[in-house]
Amino acid sequence: MGSTNSTLSKIPNVEELVQETGFTPAHIVRLYDRFEALDKEKTGHLRPQDFGAINRLAINPIGDRIIGAFFSPGQETVDFHSFVRILAHFRPADKKRPKDPSMPEPVNSRTSKLKFAFQLYDQDKDGKISRAELLQVLRSMLEMQVTEEQLESIADRTIQEADLDTDDAISFEEFRKSLEKVNIDHKMSIRFLR
Amino acid sequence: MALHSPRGSRSFLERGLLLLVMLIFLEGTVLTLGAASSPDISAQDNTGGGDDQRGIEGRHGHANYTKKAFPVLSLDYRHIHVPFEISLWVLLASLMKLGFHLIPRLSSIVPESCLLIVVGLLVGGLIKLAGEEVPPVLDSNLFFLCLLPPIILDAGYFLPIRPFMENIGTILMFAVVGTLWNAFFVGGLLYAVCQIEGTYLSQVELLPCLLFGSIISAVDPVAVLAVFEEIHINELLHILVFGESLLNDAVTVVLYHLFEEYSDAGEVTPMDVVLGVICFLIVSLGGIAVGTIYGILAAFTSRFTSHTRVIEPLFVFVYSYMAYLSAEMFHLSGIMALIACGAVMRPYVEANISHKSHTTVKYFLKMWSSVSETLIFIFLGVATVAGPHAWNWTFVSVTVILCLVSRVIGVVGLTFIINKFRIVKLTTKDQFIVAYGGLRGAIAFSLGYLLDKDLFPMRTMFLTAIITEIFFTVFVQGMTIKPLVDLLAVKKKQEAKRSINEEIHTQFLDHLLTGIEDICGHYGHHHWKDKLNRFNKKYIKKCLIAGERYKEPQLIAFYHKMEFKQAIELVESGGGVKLPSAMPSQVSMQNIQPKKLPPAVAERALPQFTKGREEEIRKILRSNLQKTRQRLRSYNRHTLVADPFEDGWNDFILKKQRMIELEKKVRLADSPSLVKPD
């Protein structure tokens, strides 16, 4: 208990974080320990190289995209607040939340999770997954095992299936619709974070 | 109304005739089976006849036998009576299954299992009325060695691995802790009730009661499958109840043997309890290990079958059955061995065997399991009529009530604990279905039947109570669960097929979550799954999958399968596409490709097409694609998607390759004069 409190006092604006993300102070402490472990040079910020040092992330097909998601456009470093905010997306959704339209969408709701995943596809941030972006994702996931033609036919087929307004790209709504049968809460939550 | 009657009366006449034929057949069956069970008379006749035959052939030269007229036609039933009876029973079971679906309203109200038990009761009753002795059909050997394995293999081979593994913790809790709770609660309270004055049951001791409790507390996979498949409940609940019914076999085996062994001694020491726990671990893990070994052997064997495709299905069946028998030999859990074998061998075997063999395996498994299930229920009915009964109001009614109560308490209590660890919590509705779906079946009856008459004088009372409990759960709970599911608006099974979007995105999300877990430094669910997948890809697939196919990523295999199916459906449905006869059939397959590709190629391959006609065709094809996608198939364990043109796979691949080459050639040849269509 004592170490928790001392760690908590080191983190600025803890209450704000708790409010915003819904993590408990214990979780914030755990995440802070992890943050410090990653931040080898103790600068208080993480750089892409720090993420790159995680070995398993290097062999992840979309590892670089995930790392990129932590950094807001134009920023070179990630501070603890942004780190926690991004990870808050993966908190299991709260069932008991009342549907209050005036409050902003909580960061771990189904829509926010899907939005986060969508942004990983949509690298140029134009709100649509174009055929080229989809091809890039497929290429990285399937590594070297398929021919270019097969990739193209899969990409074409995927867009054809999901594209309802025939603009040859997948918008967020179409993305959401194609995943309506998947239990996103279950699929995009980490039990560790509660 | 007047217009309907001629047609209605004709179909009514047909149905009536069919029913009449079946009834006559039934009567004939009954008499034959009844006659067969009294072997003395028939044996005498036949041995007399046999002797004469042998006499004529063997003592040809002897003078001291009277020459009879050469028997042109003789009846020798004894010779073939065993296979004949078996075939007769199987035929009866299948005809009954046919018959139920002729009466439309009946099959939607009453689940098939109930109807089959009633048929069994009728057959048993008819045999008894005919004065013959009812044959002891639900012999434990027959049940455990012949009737049960096909059902379990079918369930294990087609077990949906992903939801099963995701919920494995919950399933194990229900299976192990839940069954233990049920056994002790029912057994203990029964003993307490028996000790009450005035029930004339005081000679029933504690250990036999606990033994009875352990027999009756296990949820039965056959009954669960039979009832649940008709209510189309959502995947989570289905896998929870079904998984529980499969995994509680180990607990049941251990408890049964433990109490049976020590009922003689009269007491169980703490040492025995410790041994029991160790035994449980050995039984379950040993069963799984045996199954896995046989599964790997089967997968490895299938790697070399490319030249003898015809016997490929045989390996699947024989290896699985051997796994079951080997496990039973060591008193390990045969059910778990069978499930492990089927689940382990499936991905590798399917990558190796031909399309036809795959269909054969599927058909045979479903056929055997269907027949087995039908036979089990009919035999239950017959055994009810046959067996000696000792009805005791107190015992039976207390059993039924206690089973219900303990199930409800068990489920609610366990869910309370489990929900602390689950991401997707189990709601009250879910708990109700899990509790209500805990059906008992023939396994309980067979285990009771196995009890030694001398050691357990109250065996007949136990059997009566078991049968009553089975009837209660199958009839009352089985019949009412469907309306209750509708009433409570429990989520139903998702019907439509998995789209390629879902497949791609779920894989993407898997990678994403693995990455996030690595960033958090947390060794969670995804981390281990990813590790297992990598290990699988690197080492195991290389050993067990023939040729180059082990390199094929899952997404590609899925995509090919999907494209193939849609193409076949399109061609099969005819689609209403009126293409001019001058066009070769290859091109119609080609047009299935997404709309970006066809314009340039369609121009080349169909020079006589006008733009308008092309658009029309493309529109028709596209709408057909959407139509086939929307066609909903409701999942029933015993129906199979029609697989037309099974041998079209190779041709299709060839055609596709040819088309791609054609495309390339055409593009190269005409590149300077390539005109973009507007």
Image: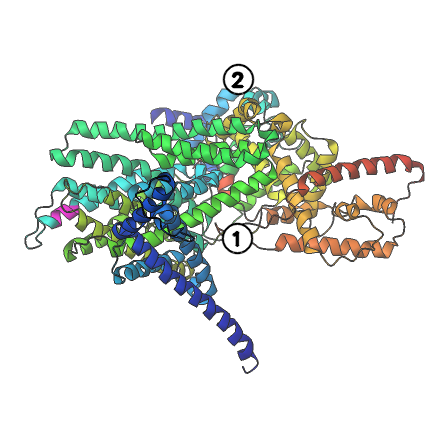
Secondary structure of the magenta portion, mostly? helix
From the viewer's perspective, is B560 left or right of B387?
right
Total residue callouts: 2
Give the structural element (helix, strand or loop) at label 2.
loop
In the foreground, B245 or A133: B245
Tell me where the magenta segment starts and ends, as one range. Answer: B189-193
Q: Residue at x 90, y 35 (%)?
A: B669
Which quadrant, please, contains the C terminus of chain A?
top left
From the viewer's perspective, is B93 left or right of B261?
right
**Is B191 part of what is drawn in magenta?**
yes
Question: Distance of mark 1 from mark 2, alpha carbons?
Answer: 42 Å
Give the residue at mark 1. Answer: A102
Q: Position of residue B553 (x, y in %)?
A: 62, 31
Tell me, what colour scheme is on the image? rainbow
* In the rendered image, residues at marks 1 and 2 fall on the same chain: yes
Q: Is residue A89 above or below residue B93?
A: above
Give the residue at mark 2. Answer: A40
Q: Position of residue B50 (x, y in %)?
A: 34, 45
Residue A33 picture quarter: top left
Give the structural element (helix, strand or loop) at label 1.
loop
Q: Is residue B75 above or below residue B542?
A: below
In the foreground, B438 or B81: B81
Q: Badge 2: how crowded within 10 Å, few (<14), some, or many (20+)?
A: few
Q: Chain of mark 1?
A: A
> Could you tell which of marks 1 and 2 lies nearer the N-terminus?
2
